Amino acid sequence: MSACGPGDGFPLTALLALAVAAVAVVLIFDYTNGFHDAANIVATVIASRAMTPAQAVLVVGFFEFLGPLLGGTAVANTIGGFVRLDGIAPSAALTILLCGLLGAITWNLVTWWKGIPSSSSHALVGGLIGAVVVSVGMERVVWGVGELAHGHVTGVTKVLLALIVSPLLGFWVAFAVHKLMGRLLAGARPRVARDLRRAQFITAAGLAFSHGANDAQKSMGILTLVLLLGGFISEFKVPFWVMLACASAITLGILSGGWRIVRTLGFAIYKVRPLHALDSQLTSAMVILGASAMGAPVSTTHVVATSIMGIGYAERPKAVRWSKAGEIATTWIVTIPAGALMGMLFYALSLAAGNVYKSL
């Protein structure tokens, strides 16, 4: 790939067009994250009949929008720092980011179409790693293994640890919460179900806010990296318009789809009742908000799904559809490698397109 910049012949207008394309693709990824990943937020609240679909979308959409604006930028800083593309020509760096993002978007669309709740976070990490490794080498990825030996958790290691630990926390925290709630509500009258449905307006809002504060920050981090590598900002600091744009894109995604995954999480793993939904939302919100405070990117899909499993295990282990859970787990495992392969494929396509353009 040819270098670019003032002294290498790459037109400034072409660089600007490439940057605009990169910004657009980041927002498209954020949008697909919305209808693919964030739709999982409404799964339990709809399955338990606490809200109508219209009510759920409005409540979740509003608090999802607030999450990126009020949730800080710790996760954005983590995502923006696990690959190093400084010192590379801006056109090359932006093309690499574009290829990684396109790989993640492609995998998101495939799993969404199949109704499988895979992780947009895994897809993003995989896509970027694949595009970076195939283009400029493994040394440009901040793996964080050496730093871990000195007690510092950073780079890909931090991302992977967060993505591995958070589902485990989702399962066991939900298990404990459901056991506790079961004891507190022992002997309660049947009408308590109505109160549990009402309480979900609060827990669903909290889950939506936590999701926005974590997931939209991933796009915020990549978008800020695009601006930095393109020379449009001088330091890695998330501008307010980036927060606003990412908040809008992910919220629009929520308003647009995700019903295939709602059916999987709300009905296929375990039959969700009002108490199950409340406990799942409460657990997921706590885990994701805690991760956001530590700058750890996590998968809402993972946390919500494993919280439902944990609740089912606490109540009736045999009633959990472990075969469906196994299918989802398999998808989780293959998402990072699949995203990496997609990122590599798009980079190869970009090279081929460049060669065709040069031959014209």
Image (tube, rainbow, N blue to C red):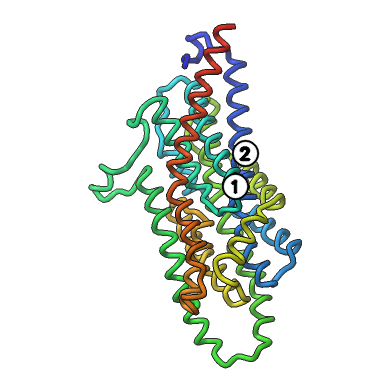
Secondary structure of the residue carrying numbered label 2: helix
User: Which quadrant: the C terminus?
Assistant: top right
Residue marked by disc 2: 27
How packed mark 1 is, by other alpha carbons closer than 10 Å (few <14, some 14-19, many 20 or more), is many
Residue marked by disc 1: 33
Residue 268, percent across and down? Answer: 58, 65
- Name which of mark 1 and mark 2 comes first in the sequence: 2
Which amino acid does the dot numbered 2 rest on?
A: Leu
Residue 281, percent across and down? Answer: 57, 67
Between residue 322 and residue 161, name the one nearer to us: 322
Which amino acid does the dot numbered 1 rest on?
A: Asn
Q: Residue furthest front?
A: 323
User: Residue, x 60% and y 32% (percent of image)?
Assistant: 23
User: Residue, x 51% and y 50% (percent of image)?
Assistant: 119
How packed mark 2 is, by other alpha carbons closer than 10 Å (few <14, some 14-19, many 20 or more), is many
Secondary structure of the residue carrying numbered label 1: helix
Between residue 321 and residue 17, name the one nearer to us: 321
